Image (cartoon, rainbow, N blue to C red):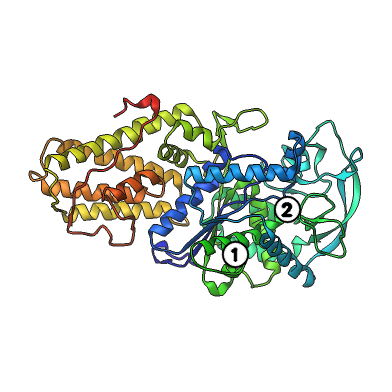
Amino acid sequence: MTHPRPAEDDRPVLVLGPNPTPNGGMHLGHMAGPYLAGDVYARYQRARGRKVVFSTGTDDSQTFVLASARRLGTDPQELCRTSTELIREALDAMGISVDGFGPFDETYHATVIDYFRELHAAGKFRLRTVRLPYLERTGEFLVEGMVEGECPVCLTTCRGGLCETCCHPNNFDELINPRSTVDPRDVPTVREATILVLPMEEYREQLTAYHEKWAPYWRPHLVQMVRDVLSRPLLDLPITYPLSWGMAAPFPETPGQVLNAWLELIPAGMYTSSYAAARTGRETTPGQLWLPEEDTRIVHFLGFDNAYFFALAHMALLMAHGDRYIRPESVLTNEFYELESEKFSTSKGHVLSVQDILKEVPRDLVRLYLALTAPEYQRTTFTRAGLAKVVGERLAGPWNRLAETLGKAVANAGGDTISLPVSATGRSLAATMLERFDFHYEMPNYSMNRAAEAILAQITRLGRIAATLDGRGLDEEPDAWGDLFLQVRTLLAVSAPILIDLAAAARQAGGFDGVLAPGAFDVPDVVPFAPPLLPVMPDSAGER
């Protein structure tokens, strides 16, 4: 199997962001991972002229909603409503370019139910009597976000169903020292319940083949986790739970039970991608874009803490549908993003929301710093000192000096519309920039870290060239100026997926047209222009 060369792969692409749980707003730890990564990738694909559908939508059925609502003393449905507003506000504020944010509505419900009804009718599920944590005081079972204990694999504290640290499942009564997440003083007993499960072992061969095919193109931590899980017996996957919160399971064998909320997310992706496609002008039925005849590729961005479900459980469910649906070709995970070297914690007040940081710092500066420090391969941290230093000394300051040098040269030329020649060397340098950024933005090498670092490096390099020309007229060194203006245009184009506001201002100033098609910068001449300036942080106004 060979991976298609990115420059030759012009298939339409479905970009899936994880479905955020509406049990609160969105902090920088959420944004620095899959949402910004998905946005930058989608923007680059659009600039290359490819058809893109980028979607997400909330995950209202999660027991984390119920647990959070009880701790807050509020109604869970009201918590979903207010949290969804905050989540959408945060995505909009950060410029996350989802084509559609699918609502949790009747169509969502019908899509999920139909997806599981087809599997039930095909006999894919099995009845199992299992032992689940049970709280005698309230008379309810505790699963997923309602219970925590120690992981039976790595012994760290985790919630029911999945360990966020090692990403191994812990089904049924496997948690060590279980306790309620609403009130840790509530220690559950264990009670039997008969539920429906998917026997994952029946899909071992297909799962192994799928991951062996794509492992060379995925990040190593995900590959390591999958191999670790596959080296052990695969646990039965709970399809239903005896709970009061969630989507009612439509199966006669399990009356009064609900679907496992984690398993909604693939049919949810089918629904949100269809919803988003409609907002780009194409009406489809839910799941249509996932059919093989659509010749679409799926790129899924998510946190590593959820990777078991997306890389194994969801894949098994897709395989249970036979060859009806395509499967993701790229699953990009990120690690945890910390705040000042401590884990984000809403309950402890150690949190920084998207809305709050954008009140203090211009959006492009935040996007660049998050892209530069995103936890792609290991835990990283957000620090205010780091943000100020990077955007002041490496981004806004150097860029503004470069832009001012070019702007002064244009002004000294008297504002006449002239063209400057571009040498073969200048065109070659622009082509090299395009090729390098294509490497950073495309699969399987996609990396916001490296793209952001390359932006900063190119600003520094072009700033040095501009400094040697500063004070000379455009007519004195037309070839050198022409080469510089072409490369600045190229830099604006390749940085546009991250520096979205600078790109918008540059388009208005005639800096570039937003197109990144091959050959777009292979030109014999260039019209000089005054590049826009980047805003500076309030406490770094002197960094110019």
Left or right? Give the position of 542 relative to 374.
left
Judge whether residue 125 can be spotted in this image.
yes
Q: Find disc 2 in the rendering and name its residue.
A: 261
Residue 320 position within the rendered picture, expressed as x and y whole percent measured from the top left: 71, 68
3D distance between C-alphas at marks 2 and 1: 20 Å
Judge whether residue 377 can be spotted in this image.
no
Q: Quadrant of the C terminus?
A: top left
Q: Secondary structure at mark 1?
A: loop
The residue at the far bottom in this view is 293
Q: Amino acid at mark 2?
A: Ala
Left or right? Give the position of 308 relative to 450.
right
Residue 9 position within the rendered picture, expressed as x and y whole percent measured from the top left: 43, 66
**Which residue shows up at 76% across the image and 52% down it?**
246
> In the image, is residue 233 above or below residue 340?
below
**Which residue shows up at 62% across the image and 67% down it?**
287
Q: Report if the CB atoms under discs 2 and 1 are less than 8 Å apart.
A: no
**Which residue shows up at 31% across the image and 48% down it?**
492
Q: Secondary structure at mark 2?
A: helix
Residue 8 position within the rendered picture, expressed as x and y whole percent measured from the top left: 40, 66
- Looking at the rendering, which quadrant does residue 230 occupy? bottom right
Along the line of sight, the residue nearer the viewer: 200 or 12: 12
Q: Amino acid at mark 1?
A: Arg
Residue 229 position within the rendered picture, expressed as x and y whole percent measured from the top left: 69, 53
> In the image, is residue 508 above or below residue 470?
below
Residue density around tag 1, few if under 14, some if 14–19, many if 20 or more, within 10 Å:
many
Q: Find disc 1 in the rendering and name its residue.
A: 327
